[in-house]
Amino acid sequence: MKLKFCPKTIFRETPKVTFFDAGIESTNGCDVVIHSGEAISPPDEFEYEQYYVHNHQIDHNLVITGERKFILINPTWDEPHHVIYLKRSMGALEIPTGTYHRSISGKEGSIVLNQPIRDKFFDPKKEFIPQKLNKLSLIEARKSPPVYWIWENDQIKRLMFNPLVKKTANSN
Ligand SMILES: [Fe+2]
């Protein structure tokens, strides 16, 4: 499963100024999601993880400040579980319809710009209801070994092991 990251065009970058075009073709929404410090969207309910899943919206999430970890679960994919350590340099992560997703910020928090593509059946009352993984196919997908996506050496890398665990192991 190849995830899509929509590239942005950098017009100008100096040590103190970055100026880029973050446009997404056919987008008809512009949402900002601010995590002030450690936060999870959507939050856990008791000990249960919760996720968003859209039926009438394709997300394109671009980190503006900070870093945010995204978890994607989609039982219809050959690799149904992905963990993305999203940074601004990676561009906007596309999240197709029917994909369960949640995002987590560290202590520093993060700001994400989402430029979705919404179809005519989009209804905000139905589209943002947190969901639990309540089907066997979803639970199995969550348990399967994730594919990790990181930014390293100026490119997006796809890994089959957790890079953060590896770094900890190396430092010992
Ligand atoms: Fe979403």
Image (cartoon, rainbow, N blue to C red):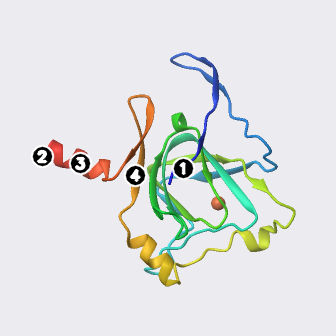
Disc 3 residue lies near ligand 1 with CB under 8 A: no
Q: Nearer the viewer, residue 64 or 61?
A: 61
How far apart are the alpha carbons under marks 3 and 2?
A: 10 Å
Q: Nearer the viewer, residue 124 or 159?
A: 159
- Identify which amino acid the numbered label 3 is placed on: Lys
- Identify which amino acid the numbered label 1 is placed on: Leu
Q: Residue at x 21, y 48 (%)?
A: 168
Q: Residue at x 40, y 52 (%)?
A: 148
Left or right placement of residue 120 versus residue 141 in this view: right
Compared to residue 80, the image places residue 169 above or below, namely above
Q: Earlier in the sequence, mark 1 or mark 4?
A: 1
Residue occupied by mark 2? 172
Q: Residues within 10 Å of mark 3 (few under 14, many from 20)?
A: few
Label 1: element kind = loop
Q: Earlier in the sequence, mark 4 or mark 3?
A: 4
Q: Residues within 10 Å of mark 4 (few under 14, many from 20)?
A: some
- Identify which amino acid the numbered label 4 is placed on: Tyr
How far apart are the alpha carbons under marks 1 and 4?
A: 11 Å
Residue occupied by mark 1? 3
Q: Position of residue 87 (x, y in %)?
A: 50, 40
Label 3: element kind = helix
Marks 4, 3: nearer the viewer: 4
Q: Earlier in the sequence, mark 2 or mark 1?
A: 1
> Which dot marks residue 166?
3
> Which dot marks residue 148?
4
- Asked if labels 1 and 3 touch by Cβ distance under 8 angstroms, the answer is no
Q: Position of residue 105 (x, y in %)?
A: 48, 53
How far apart are the alpha carbons under marks 2 and 4?
A: 22 Å
Q: Earlier in the sequence, mark 3 or mark 2?
A: 3
Q: Position of residue 22 (x, y in %)?
A: 68, 34
Q: Earlier in the sequence, mark 2 or mark 4?
A: 4
